Structure formats: structure tokens, C-alpha cells
Image (cartoon, helix red, strand yellow):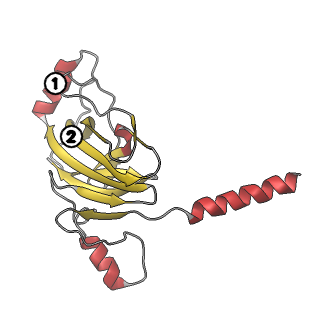
Amino acid sequence: MRWVVVVLLAMLCLLVCGCVEEPKVVTKENTKDVNLTNNKSDKKNEVEENVKGSYSNPASMNDIVAVDTLSGQFEVQVLDCMRGIKANRVIKEANMFNLKPDRGFEYLLVKVKFTYTSGKNPHYLSAYSFKVYADGVGYSPSFVILPEELPEFKDVDLMAGGSAEGWIAFMVPENTETLIAYEYLFKPVCFIKVC
């Protein structure tokens, strides 16, 4: 009986590993479908690095970045952002228990829109599905209370055709270039340059 369980678990692991597809990222302006996997072809790797929405060539604010995964197709867009003194003031005034940013850091507020364009199953999404990268380091969302006029990005289960929109707060190093990334299966799959 024990061997049957071990064999079934091994088969399940192989099935799961074989069913995970690397996501594809394209922007609406550049609809070329390029897979972001590690291939042996130098020419293909060069093309992948130059794809709009990649780490080396991030999309811009208001660009719609399409992400194609085994789970379905999604669109990610940054609608607005603020950082520095203005964002720090907004966070401080929203709730007296919100912490000041650490020394050398500032708050970054990003308004994200995520659309589940097609797929068969519900897709769970939260603010923690996103990270901000600055100087090659990824930062998770901060625990803060946002003001009512900046509705936070909620934890949701989306069905195909559904979308979610809201603000996410991050604490990032001051005066650095920042990229927000949507993460699929714990890997960043698209990058958008923010303020």
C-alpha cells in the first residue's frame, strides 16, 4: 500500500512539472508572441531581452502588457503612481499608525489594473501578486492603511472576463528607478516602469 502512495505522488509531481508553461509577455503595441524561456539560441535570447515588458525593456505606464500562461491570458496595466514627499504625506495622513518610511526609503503608491482576458478556472490575485524592483532588488507591498480616495487593491478570485483595480503601497529606496512586476508562480513575468 505504501508503494502505491509513493508511485501516485511521483506521478502527480511529474504531471504538475510537465504542465507548467513559461509565460509569454507582449504589449498591445507589440503583439509579437515571444516565449520568455531560457533557450539555447543566442538570437532568440537577444529578441527575448528586447521584448517590451521584459526586465531589460520594461513597458511604460498606461501600456497594456498581455501575459500568456498555462492558466490563462491576463492583461496588466499601471494607471497612475506617486512617490516621495507626496506619497509619504498621503500615507501619514491616512492613518496615525502607518509607519514612516525607513531611512533612505520612501513610499511608492501604484494604481494597477489586472484583467483576466481568457481561461477556464478562477485566478486568485492580491497585492502580493506584485513586487517592485529597484536596483535589482524586489520589494513586496507594505502594510499600510490607504485613504478612502485611493482604494486598495483587494484580494480577489477572478473569472475570465473579470478585472480588478486598486492602489498598492511599496517602500522603495529614494531616487531610484522602479519597475513593478506581476508574479506568476513566484516568478516575475512582466515589468512596467513606474514613477
The circle on residue 149 is 1
**Number of residues whose C-alpha sits closer than 10 Å to that of mark 2, classed few (under 14), some (14–19) or many (20 or more):** many
Image depth: mark 1 or mark 2 in front: 1
Drawn side of residue 124 relative to residue 136, left or right: right
- Residue furthest to the left in view is 86
Residue 191 location (% of width, % of height)? 27, 56
| Quadrant of the rendered image containing residue 82 | top left
- Residue furthest to the top in view is 96
- Identified by mark 2, the residue type is Val
Residue 30 location (% of width, % of height)? 20, 68
- Cα gap from disc 1 to disc 2, whole angstroms: 14 Å
Residue depicted at 46% across the width and 60% down the height: 70
Residue 151 visible (yes or no): yes
Determine which residue is flagged by label 2.
Answer: 110
Drawn side of residue 164 relative to residue 40, left or right: left
Residue depicted at 73% across the width and 55% down the height: 9
Between 80 and 72, the residue placed more toward the observer is 72
- Identified by mark 1, the residue type is Glu
Q: Earlier in the sequence, mark 1 or mark 2?
A: 2
Residue depicted at 39% across the width and 84% down the height: 41
Mark 2: secondary structure: strand
Is residue 32 placed above or below 141 in the rendered structure?
below
